[in-house]
Amino acid sequence: MASLSGKTIFMTGGSRGIGRAIAVRAARDGANVTIASKTAEPHPKLPGTIHTVAAEIEEAGGQALALQVDARDEDRVAQAIAETADRFGGIDIVVNNASAIMLADTENTPMKRYDLMQEVNARATFCVTQAALPHLKASAKKGNDPQVLVLSPPLNLDPRWFAPHVAYTISKYGMSMCVLGWGQEFQEYGIAANALWPRTTIATAAVEFALGGEPMMEMSRTPEIMADAAHAVLTQPATETGHFYIDDEVLAGIGKTDLSEYAVTPGATEFMPDLFL
C-alpha cells in the first residue's frame, strides 16, 4: 500500500474534526505533520487544540509541530511555513482544511461574517498555498510527488447552491476555483492540486452547530471516511491533478465499498447528503 512515510504535511485548521482525522491517519504512516490552527487553548464547548492533536500524531507514529496560526495573517503564515521547513527539511503536502461557515441568506448575513468566510476560506487557501509553493517545487525536484489538497466542493453553478447562502457558497467555491486553476498552473512544476468533499454530512462541530444539531449528527459519517479518502488522494502520483474528488468514490477506486464502519449510528443505511451534491 502507498504510504506517506517521511512526507511533511502542512495542515490548516486541524485541531478537530476532519483535519484532525487526516493528520492522525497520515501519522500512522510515519508522516511529519504541522498543525497550524488558531486553537491553542481549550474551547468551552469544542474538544481539541493544536497541542492535543500533536500528541495524537506522536502517539500514532508521526512527528508533530503545533503552531498557533491565523491563516488570514499572511506574515504568520509565512513564518509558520518557514518553521515547518526548518523543522522537517521541507514541505511535501499542503492540506487547506481551515474553513468558516454561516448558512444565512443575504439579508441575514452580517458583513463581518461575510468577510470572515471569504478570508478563512478562499483567501487563506490562496495565501497558504502561495507561501508553501517554493517548498513544494523543491519537493517535486526530489521526486516526492508534492500535493495540494483543498477541502472544497465540486463547482456547480446551479442556483440552488447559491440562493440559500450566497456568501458561504462564494467562499467555498473560491477555494474550488483555486483548485481549478492550480490543477493546470502547477503541472509544469510537478505539483498536484485536488479537492475533496464528502458525499454525506460528517460528524463535526460545523454540522452540529450550523446544520441541525444531534439529529443531523446521527445521520452523518465520521471524519475517518474523509481521512481515508484523503490518504488515498495524497499517495497518488502528482500527475493526478485538477480533480474534484468525492470521498466514497475515492474509496471505491481503491476497492473499499463497505463503508459501514464510518456510520455514526451503527447499522445506519440512510445518510444526510452534504451541501453542494
Image (cartoon, rainbow, N blue to C red):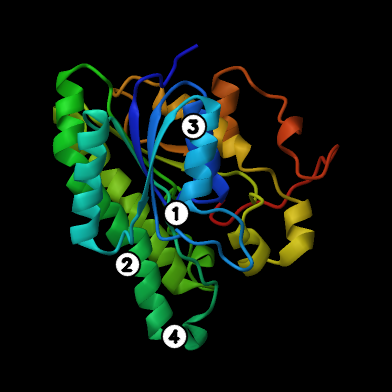
Of residues 76 and 231, the one drawn nearer to the viewer in this rendering: 76
Distance CA(mark 4)–CA(mark 2): 14 Å
Distance CA(mark 3)–CA(mark 2): 31 Å
Are circles 1 and 4 on residues that touch, CB within 8 Å? no
Are circles 3 and 2 on residues that touch, CB within 8 Å? no
Of residues 264 and 189, the one drawn nearer to the viewer in this rendering: 264
Distance CA(mark 3)–CA(mark 4): 41 Å
What amino acid is at disc 4? Pro
Residue wearing tag 2: 119
Residue wearing tag 4: 110
| Label 2 residue SS | helix
Q: Residue at the location (45% across, 14% down)? A: 2
Among all residues in the image, which is located at the extreme bottom?
Answer: 107
Of residues 4 and 160, the one drawn nearer to the viewer in this rendering: 4
Q: Percent x, y for residue 61?
A: 50, 24
Residue wearing tag 3: 58
Are circles 1 and 2 on residues that touch, CB within 8 Å? no
Q: Residues within 10 Å of mark 1 (few under 14, many from 20)?
A: few
Q: Residues within 10 Å of mark 2 (few under 14, many from 20)?
A: many
Give above or below for 169 relative to 252: below
Q: Percent x, y for residue 112?
A: 38, 82
Distance CA(mark 3)–CA(mark 1): 39 Å
Select label 1 or label 2 by which is in front. 2
Q: Earlier in the sequence, mark 1 or mark 2?
A: 2
What amino acid is at disc 2? Glu
